[in-house]
Amino acid sequence: MTVLLENRAQRFAAACRTDPATLGLRVPRLPDSLAALSAVSHPVMQSSANRSGEPDARSLAEVPSSMREGVDLVLDGGELPGTASTVVDLRDYALQRRWHVLREGALASDAVRGAARVQRLRTAILRWC
């Protein structure tokens, strides 16, 4: 899933693309071959492994060599499913409690809505207790 957040401080330009007021954060479901990354306790700044508008790279061999040459570290997770991430816009959530799915991808919109309902219920229960 990719979430869009308001970027009030306009930090992390590489993660903002062309809109410095919006920060895009990707929260991937990692395959077993990359499970060790789950132990990383800080965000990892990375770009997509494809040029904007071009097909997703499903393996390291499909990542343009010009992109691989400009990075500090390359991890080969084997062939990935190549399904685009679901994009959820949370920029209005803090003030208006509104969010919406901009693009349905690997995670169905219904699953996002269900997770949001569970989180609201969990929050209400914790306040009550």
Image (cartoon, grey):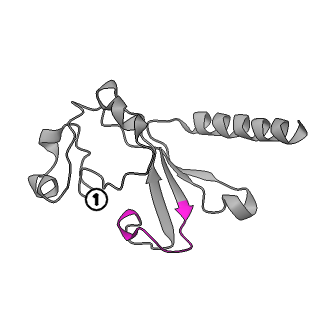
In the rendered structure, the answer to whether residue 51 lies left or right of residue 38 reads left
Farthest top residue in view: 32
Q: Is residue 111 above or below residue 17?
A: above
Residue 94 location (% of width, % of height): 69, 61
Residue 9 location (% of width, % of height): 53, 74
Displayed quadrant of residue 72: bottom left
In the rendered structure, the answer to whether residue 66 lies left or right of residue 14 reads left
Identified by mark 1, the residue type is Ser
Residue 6 part of the magenta-drawn span: yes
Displayed quadrant of residue 116: top right
Helix, strand or loop at mark 1: loop
Instruction: Give the extent of the magenta segment.
Output: 5-15
Q: Residue at x 12, y 40 (%)?
A: 61
User: The C terminus lies in which quarter of the figure?
Assistant: top right
Q: Is residue 18 above or below residue 49?
A: below
Q: Residue at x 37, y 67 (%)?
A: 17
Q: Which residue is mark 1?
A: 52
In the rendered structure, the answer to whether residue 89 lies left or right of residue 83 reads right
Residue 63 location (% of width, % of height): 16, 47
| Relative depth, front residue between 121 and 55 | 121
Residue 45 location (% of width, % of height): 35, 56
